Image (cartoon, helix red, strand yellow):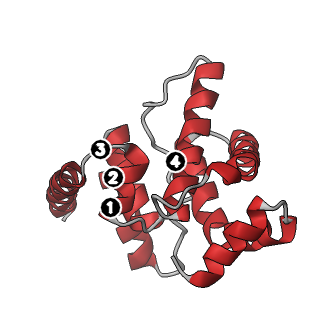
Amino acid sequence: MDSREQRLIERTKKGDRNAFEQLISPYSAALYNYIAFRVSNDADADDIIQETMLSIWRSIASYNYKSSFKTWAFSIAIRRLIDFYRKNGGNENLPLTDFENVFKAKDNISESIERMDVERALSNLNSKESELVYLVFYAQLSYTEVSAVLDIPVGTVKSRMSGIKAKLKNLLSQEG
């Protein structure tokens, strides 16, 4: 953690809203995309991100530097998602087929075809595999950070990602 982030955390702990905005800013898009990736509509994603930000603000005093701030914030986002599914009687392991928030359309036709192939391959992953892909490639969390967020050993993250990469490689090679 850099000293600037540490100063922002300390100022936020004292109730400085401006410091909180500066602190959360580098992570807000990744947090929103992670949440949007897990729910079916933008309104739910907006509600959950609002609850996540409020939870981060309210619980910042308990942040103890044992993990990175980014890891800690993602852990809170996951808890808010679980709360959302419990409250709405849903299942947090719903299949993820809407990658619109993750993949953006390309202007070039060949890139669009490649994007569709990747989307099709990713749609064959189960929800836990999709979550790992998102956390590693889109949220750009390290394996150690993913381990902390999901509360699983780093070795498990590595072996699952290895299996996912092999599965995606196989699926994409079948696509031609």
Between 158 and 169, the one lying in front of the other is 158
Q: Which residue is mark 4?
A: 75
For marks 1 and 3, give the CA distance.
Answer: 10 Å
Q: Are marks 2 and 3 in contact (CB under 8 Å)?
A: yes
Q: Which three-letter amino acid code belongs to the residue tagged 2?
A: Ser
Q: Which residue is mark 2?
A: 147
For marks 2 and 1, give the CA distance.
Answer: 5 Å
Residue 77, horizontal then vertical, whole percent: 59, 46
**Which mark is on residue 144?**
1
Q: Which three-letter amino acid code belongs to the residue tagged 1?
A: Thr
Q: Which three-letter amino acid code belongs to the residue tagged 4?
A: Ser
Q: Earlier in the sequence, mark 2 or mark 4?
A: 4
For marks 2 and 4, give the CA distance.
Answer: 11 Å
User: Secondary structure under badge 1?
Assistant: helix
**Which mark is on residue 152?**
3
Mark 2 nearby-residue class (10 Å; few <14, some 14–19, many ≥20): some
User: Secondary structure under badge 4?
Assistant: helix
For the point 67% across and 41% down, the residue is 41
User: Secondary structure under badge 2?
Assistant: helix
Q: Are marks 4 and 3 in contact (CB under 8 Å)?
A: no
Q: Are marks 2 and 1 in contact (CB under 8 Å)?
A: yes
Q: Which three-letter amino acid code belongs to the residue tagged 3?
A: Ile
Q: Earlier in the sequence, mark 2 or mark 3?
A: 2
Mark 3 nearby-residue class (10 Å; few <14, some 14–19, many ≥20): few
Q: Is residue 106 left or right of residue 7?
A: left
Mark 1 nearby-residue class (10 Å; few <14, some 14–19, many ≥20): some
For marks 4 and 3, give the CA distance.
Answer: 12 Å
For marks 4 and 1, give the CA distance.
Answer: 13 Å
